[in-house]
Image (cartoon, rainbow, N blue to C red):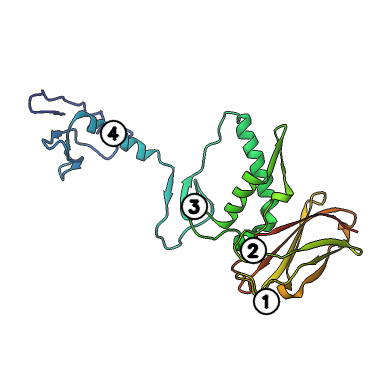
Amino acid sequence: MLSLSKDHPPIHLPKKHLFSEEHPHHSRRTSETITPNTDKTSHLKTNTAKTFQVAPTCCFLCYLRFSNHKKHRKMARITKGILGGFSGKVGTIVGANWRGQDIIRSIPKPSSRPPSEKQLLQQNKFKLVISFLQPLRNIQSRYFGSGSGSKSRVNMAASYTISEAVLVTADVPSLVYNKILITKGDLTGFQNVTASAQSGNQISLSWEDNSLQGNASIADSISIVCYGEELGRFEIFESVALRPDLSVDVTLPADCNGKAMEVYAFISNEMQISASTSFYLGQLQII
């Protein structure tokens, strides 16, 4: 029985209605008795006799909508647990870290609708950037951004690259190498750094000593990152020199000979917890 006010006649609900065991939204409710609550500002309550107290009709409808909404939620946050957060698929759920929080969610159902042109372009940009940055994950997980907030450093690197270093021509995305950042930080960077190709598949790097500037230190180390588009791979040389050394030579593999390489360099501190923003040194033809 549903009563909305003292003067309104009672409304009888059939047993197979909203609060019966057969109703999908209220499988645990078996009582159909509803009594009014004269205080219209109170919230929904349930007493020990499974009797609902409701105010105006709108509150009753809101309750039903809220129950229906809770049923269809597909993501939950893990706050505590003996195993903590996890990553990957387990049965019909997937564990992941989203914006700094461990979550579980149901496996999404594949859509039968084909993606729009805009969605397809965004998917292609994402695939391009993630594939390109994958070999840099170890570097960027330490040296890209501040590491605070809900976004991981790797995610920040991907977001930056997609928004700032991708050019779309005739719906085909491509990377803009002089806008790509390998690292992003507040450590004092290079002063007058240059790079040149030397015989024997070598790249020679030189710079001026600025160990006394800002937060620089004589213990800071130099790293070089090279990318060959034709080869589709990176050549990474971490901590190959110190800031006061002023120059360093690195040797690339033999199959890099004659290939064009995009060259980047960055500086990291002795504790390997902060770095400068990487510097793009241009494209060099390896000889």
Q: Which residue is mark 4?
A: 64
Residue at mark 2:
276
Q: Amino acid at mark 1?
A: Ile
Q: Earlier in the sequence, mark 4 or mark 1?
A: 4
> In the rendered view, would you say 98 is above or below 194?
above
Where residue 22 sits: x, y (%)?
A: 30, 32
Q: Give the camera-side residue of 202 and 178.
A: 178
Callout 4: few (<14), some (14-19), or many (20+) C-alpha neighbours within 10 Å? Answer: some
Q: Are marks 2 and 1 in contact (CB under 8 Å)?
A: no
- The amino acid type of the residue labelled 3 equals Arg
Circle 3 residue: 99
For the residues labelled 3 and 2, say whether their Cβ atoms are less than 8 Å apart: no
* Tag 4–tag 1 contact (CB < 8 Å): no
Query: Residue at label 1?
Result: 218
- Splitting the image into 4 quarters, where does residue 200 fall? bottom right
Task: State the residue at coordinates (60%, 55%).
Answer: 154
Q: Is residue 133 above or below residue 70?
A: below
Which mark is in front, 3 or 2?
2
| Res. 21 visible in picture | no
In-image side of 140 versus 33 (left or right): right
Image-based side of 164 in relation to 17, left or right? right
What distance separates the C-alpha of mark 3 from that of mark 2? 24 Å
**SS label for mark 3:** loop
Which quadrant would the C terminus be assigned to in this image? bottom right
| Image coords of residue 56 (percent x, y) | 18, 30
**Residue 208 bears which disc, if any?**
none
